[in-house]
């Protein structure tokens, strides 16, 4: 069996939950003298791997699982290119309305924006589009480039990166998906794919099933 190597804070979280379950994330953070945001990735890992169970409005429980192999060598060896999906991209001068339609038809949480040379220049999420529509903008006339998050503020991964790195970026930056890119010698960024929470969750289930 291949065992997960938990860090000291994750092990301490398990001890706190064992002693005080059910316990909220606020109380766990207080016991460790850190913020809830600091614990977000640790709690995500502990719940996704089944060590802790979370119930809305109740708190965290210890499941009794102390050793698991869900995130062992199988997942450590996986690269982004092994599970990435096709990206959904639009040009920066496309209207907000057309992007909303594209997002609905493609059933994705974010769309990647490219310039006239097809280089990545931004990303837009459902939240961005919601803010724009509530703000009273003319969605038929305003180009998506006006509200997108621009590079270099866009979080990316490369196809050779590990799944663990991609998962960490998604959790830490609280995004639905991130673009898989390739940067050429002229520092131009091409979008090759898309890695999302769904891709990673499916991989977990496949490994658990095996």
Image: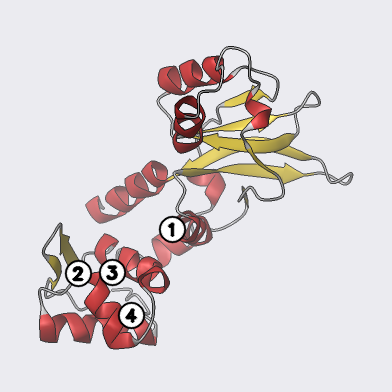
| Number of residues whose C-alpha sits closer than 10 Å to that of mark 4, classed few (under 14), some (14–19) or many (20 or more) | some
At x 19%, y 69%, the residue is 52
Cα gap from disc 1 to disc 4, whole angstroms: 16 Å
Cα gap from disc 2 to disc 3, whole angstroms: 6 Å
Q: Secondary structure at mark 1?
A: helix
Q: Quadrant of the N terminus?
A: bottom left
At x 30%, y 63%, the residue is 70
**Residue named by callout 2:** 52
Q: Secondary structure at mark 2?
A: strand
Residue 140 position by quadrant: top right
**Residue named by callout 1:** 171
At x 23%, y 81%, the residue is 14
Relative image position of residue 181 (x, y in whole percent): 67, 43
Label 3 with label 4: CB-CB less than 8 Å? yes
Q: Is residue 46 left or right of residue 138?
A: left
Label 2 with label 3: CB-CB less than 8 Å? yes
**Image disc number at residue 10:** 4
């Amino acid at each position: 069996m291949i065992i997960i190597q938990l860090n000291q804070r994750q092990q301490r979280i398990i001890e706190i939950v064992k002693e005080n379950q059910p316990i909220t994330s606020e109380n766990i953070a207080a016991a460790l003298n850190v913020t809830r945001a600091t614990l977000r990735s640790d709690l995500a890992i502990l719940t996704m791997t089944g060590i802790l169970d979370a119930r809305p409005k109740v708190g965290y429980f210890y499941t009794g699982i102390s050793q698991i192999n869900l995130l062992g060598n199988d997942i450590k060896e996986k690269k982004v290119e092994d599970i990435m999906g096709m990206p959904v991209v639009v040009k920066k001068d496309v209207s907000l309305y057309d992007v909303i339609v594209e997002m609905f038809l493609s059933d994705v949480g974010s769309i990647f924006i490219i310039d006239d040379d097809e280089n990545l220049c931004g990303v837009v999420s459902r939240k961005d589009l919601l803010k724009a529509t509530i703000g009273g903008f003319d969605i038929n006339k305003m180009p998506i480039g006006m509200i997108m998050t621009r590079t270099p503020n866009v979080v990316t991964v490369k196809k050779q990166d590990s799944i663990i790195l991609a998962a960490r970026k998604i959790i830490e930056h609280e995004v639905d998906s991130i673009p898989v890119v390739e940067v050429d010698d002229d520092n131009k960024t091409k979008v090759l794919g898309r890695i999302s929470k769904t891709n990673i969750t499916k991989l977990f289930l496949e490994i658990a099933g095996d």
